[in-house]
Image: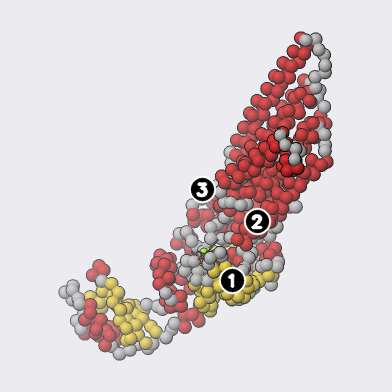
Amino acid sequence: MRNVWIICRKELGSYFVSPIAYLLLTMFAVIFGFFFWNALGYFVLMGMESQMRGQMFPMNLNEEVIRPLLSNVSVVGLFFIPMITMRLFAEEKRTGTIELLATSPIRDLEIILGKWCAAMILYACLLLFTALNFAFLFRYGNPDWKPLAIGYLGLLLQAGGLLAIGTFISTLTKNQIIAGAATFGVCLLLWVLEWVSGYETATWARVLSYMSVITHFESFAKGVLDVKDAIFYLTVIFVGLFFTSRSMESLRWRS
Amino acid sequence: MIKVKDLTKRYARTIAVDQISFEVEKGQIVGFLGPNGAGKTTTMRMLTCFLPPTSGSATVAGFDVLEQPLEVKKRIGYLPETPPLYPEMETADYLTFVGRIKGLSGSELNKRVDFVCERCAVADVKKRILGKLSKGYRQRVGLAQAIIHNPDVLILDEPTAGLDPKQINETRDLIKSLAGDHTIVLSTHILPEVEQTCQQVIIINRGKLVATDSVQNLQSRAGGAESVLVEVAGRNGNLDWSVVQKRLEQLRGVSRVHYKTSHANRNIFEVESQKGFVRGDLARAVVEAGWDLNELRPAAMSLEEIFLQLTGSEASVGPREVVAKGAD
Ligand SMILES: Nc1ncnc2c1ncn2[C@@H]1O[C@H](COP(=O)(O)OP(=O)(O)OP(=O)(O)O)[C@@H](O)[C@H]1O
Ligand SMILES: [Mg+2]
């Protein structure tokens, strides 16, 4: 456990001494800010329209603003995850520092968990920026906080799975760009798999759409904690990290 | 301390290390010698549990590298061929990080960081970013990193590569001072380095063990012959070297005379002879023939020659050039 933390801290250090963390934070904040004001503007417009028509059906911040925004974050996250994970192992392999880690008295699993945790913490920092926007909603309205919390839990779980996959891909190459591009491809694929359910209901389509990380996020966005979906994400995390450790092992046998 | 038996490493196409066996006693400094591509780095990587052997076994401090890698790693300090530095870290932070993953903590860690900075002469770059250090300083930080946890066994892959002459000497002294408590294996293709620092030499070539012996034994093994370098000049400036060569060859005890160079008007001959050959005879012969004797000195049969003898082939021409540079 101590070793995991040492590695994690070192990774966080290199995220935050290089511009990468700040770049990601800024881009994420800007993009999300844009979504947020759009969603809010739309919400206000809808509110005024319904008032003019004299309809007084209740408008719900959670349903109208938070839920679509959370879904947006989960999609935008797909684009940021490759940038977080691409250097994790590829860089160590390129500079030869992997030789230091691999000959130190720490286990492969501790290295992997440390790196993955650092990636998670950076992603959580990105989410923190979105939380600032939501804080604004709490200041001027009174949305329900529980669905929001569950939404965030979903975001973290989803990112955890994708970050684990990205970590795995990063062990396969010395080249950050290749690792990043491949992770991006996989993230995108895991997103669009869901589309097949739009026109096809055969078993294969259902399996494909089940594999999509987005389908499992819907319940979280709604603010419902569905154990099945949580288990799906936990499985992805586990499988991703498991493959990473296998890959690290075979790295030695091959190279 | 280190036992290696029939160690073999096969890559997809090449056999990098082919059934080598050797043992290293506690407290010894062992030089691992071989031309480029001989398999030195590969062997060291197997000893440090970075690469698993294809077959054979290696134990360090009684622990098998395959069965108890964690125990082995705890006792080993390793300087890889390229120092494993994180370019974005500061020297002191880096050493602290390495100390931590090697299991140090608290005030002991701080003490060790200060100590190794002092020992490896990197105290003045403590706050510098590693990526901006010069090659020699990187090498020193690499060395500092290897000894930070005061390991029983030190494995150093070309520890003096890229250092300036003064630093080379200091590093050799450092390595020597670490012996005794530590068992040290260092690889190099600089022969004088082995002569100066090591007690035992392991010579490998193309993955095969060529010789393993103490430095003295190897030197005396080649002690059967002796050779001297002679510089001869003609009185009026020009000199027919073939005449000189013939004359010298006639001397009793001389087995071979080899004309080396004539650059800058210097005619240098290498005279090989049996043991007990009297140099006075040689000097007298030169002077009596009316030539000037400018220089007469023994060409010590060094490890270099032994090395070339043992590794044979033209493959060892490369290392020879390195030797010329490395020698003081
Ligand atoms: N990852 C690898 N894949 C395939 N072959 C390799 C690999 N690493 C080394 N080799 C081969 O193994 C042999 C031994 O290499 P090694 O690096 O151990 O040599 P060395 O003695 O350290 O040489 P040098 O003095 O140049 O450092 C070489 O023929 C090399 O081409
Ligand atoms: Mg080497």
Label of residue A96 in the image: none
At 82% across and 34% down in the image, what residue appears? A224
Q: CA distance from mark 3 to mark 2?
A: 30 Å
Mark 3 highlights which residue? B132
At 46% across and 78% down in the image, what residue appears? B310
State the image quarter where residue A130 is shown.
top right
Q: Amino acid at mark 2?
A: Met
- Total numbered circles: 3
Q: Amino acid at mark 3?
A: Lys
Whole-percent x and y of residue B319?
A: 43, 68
Judging from the image, what secondary structure is the residue with disc 2 in?
A: helix
Q: CA distance from mark 2 to mark 1?
A: 21 Å
Whole-percent x and y of residue A65?
A: 75, 24
Q: Is residue B194 visible?
A: no
Q: Amino acid at mark 1?
A: Thr
Mark 1 highlights which residue? B8
Is there CB contact under 8 Å for labels 2 and 1?
Answer: no
Viewer-proximal residue, A223 or B108?
A223
> 10 Å neighbourhood of mark 3: few (<14), some, or many (≥20)?
few
Quadrant of the image containing the N terminus of chain B = bottom right
Disc 3 CB within 8 Å of nearest ligand 2 atom: no
Residue B312 as seen in the image, left or right of residue B187: left
Q: CA distance from mark 1 to mark 3?
A: 38 Å
> 10 Å neighbourhood of mark 2: few (<14), some, or many (≥20)?
some
Label 2 and label 1 in one chain: no
Mark 2 highlights which residue? A248
Q: Nearer the viewer, mark 3 or mark 2?
A: 2
Label 3 and label 2 in one chain: no
Viewer-proximal residue, A110 or A249?
A249
State the image quarter where residue A141 is shown.
top right
